[in-house]
Every structure is written in C-alpha cells, then in structure tokens.
C-alpha cells in the first residue's frame, strides 16, 4: 500500500492534513470524490480527532507521501 497526504484548505491560512493508505493515486482520488459534500472524520498524525463537512473546503490536494524516519537522520 502507498501512503497519500490529503490536505483540506479552508482559506489561505487554515488547513487540515490527513494521511491515507490506499493502493494508488486513482483510488485515493475516487475516495476523496466519494466523500464530497458529506461529513468525514479522522484522527491526524498528532492524535487530534477531526470532523468536517467537505462542502466547507475550498481546495483539496492529494499527493503521494514518502515518509522519512526521523531516527535515520
């Protein structure tokens, strides 16, 4: 599985980031489209629970994420 970073932008300064594990970019896009105009909930990498209505989001970005382990630096 690949890891994708999904960023929900509300305006120029406010956004929420979510990481999903899915097989491909195409499947990630399909998931995001299927969640359009409804409530979604998730816990972010800091352990903070988020619940948002995707109708209130202005821009959604999806990109494959390549996690770098901090212990290897």
Image: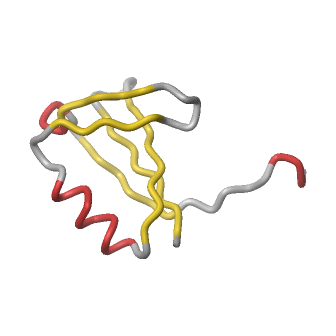
- Left or right of 45 on screen, residue 52: left
Q: Would you place residue 2 above or below residue 73 in this image?
A: below
User: Residue 18 at what x, y percent from top left?
Assistant: 44, 43
Q: Residue at x 18, y 50 (%)?
A: 35
Q: Residue at x 44, y 55 (%)?
A: 20
Name which quarter of the figure residue 49 lies in: top left
Colouring of the image = secondary structure
Q: Residue at x 56, y 60 (%)?
A: 65
Image height of 10 relative to 23, above or below: above
Image location of residue 64, percent across then percent down: 50, 64
The residue nearer to you, when weighing 1 against 55, is 1
- Does 21 sit left or right of 51 as displayed? right
Residue 10 appears at what percent x and percent y?
27, 29
Residue 32: name its quadrant: bottom left
Classify 10 as above or below 29. above
In the shown orientation, is residue 60 left or right of residue 16?
A: left
- Classify 31 as above or below 44: below
Q: Please report the residue visible at 45 percent of the width from the left and 35 percent of the height from the top.
A: 43
Across the whole image, how many numbered discs are drawn on residues?
A: 0
Relative image position of residue 59 (x, y in whole percent):
26, 43
């Amino acid at each position: 599985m690949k890891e994708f970073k999904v960023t929900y932008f509300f305006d120029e300064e406010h956004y929420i980031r979510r990481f999903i594990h899915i097989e491909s970019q195409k499947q990630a896009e399909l998931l995001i489209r299927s969640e359009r105009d409804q409530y979604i909930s998730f816990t972010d990498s800091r352990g903070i629970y988020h619940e948002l209505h995707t109708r209130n989001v202005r821009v959604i970005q999806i990109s494959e994420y390549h996690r770098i382990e901090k212990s290897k630096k």
